[in-house]
Image (cartoon, grey):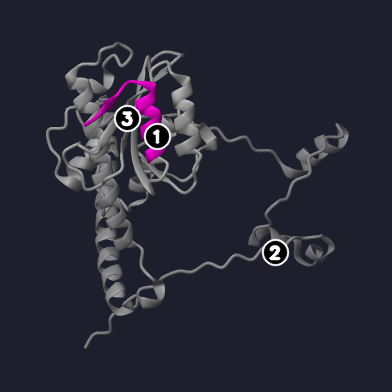
Amino acid sequence: MPYLTTAAEIRSQITKYSQASTLWIDTEVADFTTRNPRLSLIQILDNPQDMTGDSVYILDVLDQPSLTNDFINQIMLNSSIEKVFHNASYDVKFLGGKKAKNVTCTLEMAKDIPFHILPLPNYQLKTLANFLCNFYGIDKQEQGSNWGVRPLSDDQLEYAYFDCIYLAQVHSKLLNLQSEITKDPSQEDLYSLSQTYIEVEKRKKLINAEFDYLQDRLKKAMDVQKVSETDYCKMSSYDRKSVKVKFTELMRVVESENINLDFPVTLTEKLQKELGGNLELLDVDIETTKVVRLIPKTQEEE
């Protein structure tokens, strides 16, 4: 678990990483709650099979912008290297920003997995590592520690090392899930898929009906009992305001005040019917959208 602090060591390791195909990367930031956060550490793993941390390198780049720029130019701007982060938008702010290329974010990957397959309360790296990889007892206490002091404590360095391991393992599991849910439509078993769809649709109707029923009961009970909040939920209300005007009145003001109010109006079936033959006098733009619905067949009694 090498911790590199000299410029020569760090530049040498960056050059080695420039030949990698995939890197799993994390950062630690000093003064992250202030207006002037400073990049403190860059942690990199190039071997996703490593569970010990021996392949994780920590680059100490605190207040060394030239080293950070070397990393950005050789790694972050290199499109041939896949860079894997969790919550990449945060880390990349310190590592090239929008110029960074070929960046993968496990947070976004997790969000794209359907909830029934990945039913989690949040998509934090710790939560994903627990659920997908059976990593328990992950201590995130050091995350909020002072990364601007030197020397760093052993606990800080250990925390920094292991985040890359969690990241690589979570990434692997998410790739497997992506593969499972990405099916070739031409190879789907329509009979089996249809059966599953009908079964789920029935459960959905039951759940929706029960949910609406319980929600209505709970709102009425809380309203009558003058309770705005329980241990599990709270009531929220607001006044929805709609501003309406007669079309003729609107036209009068537009014409009298010479207001440029030119925008398309959707003609509903009712409006089209009321216009009748006058519809042909209008220069209409017709957009056709194909709507596909699945209609379950009712089973015939034997």
Q: Residue 122, image x and y in percent?
A: 28, 38
Q: Look at the image and give the residue range highlighted in magenta.
A: 1-16
Q: Residue 26, image x and y in percent?
A: 33, 33
**Mark 1 residue crowding within 10 angstroms, few (<14) / some (14–19) / many (20+):** many
Q: Amino acid at mark 2?
A: Lys
Q: Which residue is mark 3?
A: 235
Label whose residue precedes the other's in the sequence (2 or 3): 3
**Mark 2 residue crowding within 10 angstroms, few (<14) / some (14–19) / many (20+):** few
| Nearer to me, 41 or 13 | 13
Figure check: 274 above or below 138:
below
Q: Tell me the CA gap for discs 2 and 3.
A: 43 Å
Label whose residue precedes the other's in the sequence (1 or 2): 1
Q: Which mark is residue 14?
A: 1
Q: Amino acid at mark 1?
A: Ile
**Mark 3 residue crowding within 10 angstroms, few (<14) / some (14–19) / many (20+):** few
Which quadrant of the figure contains the C terminus?
bottom left
Q: Which mark is residue 273?
A: 2
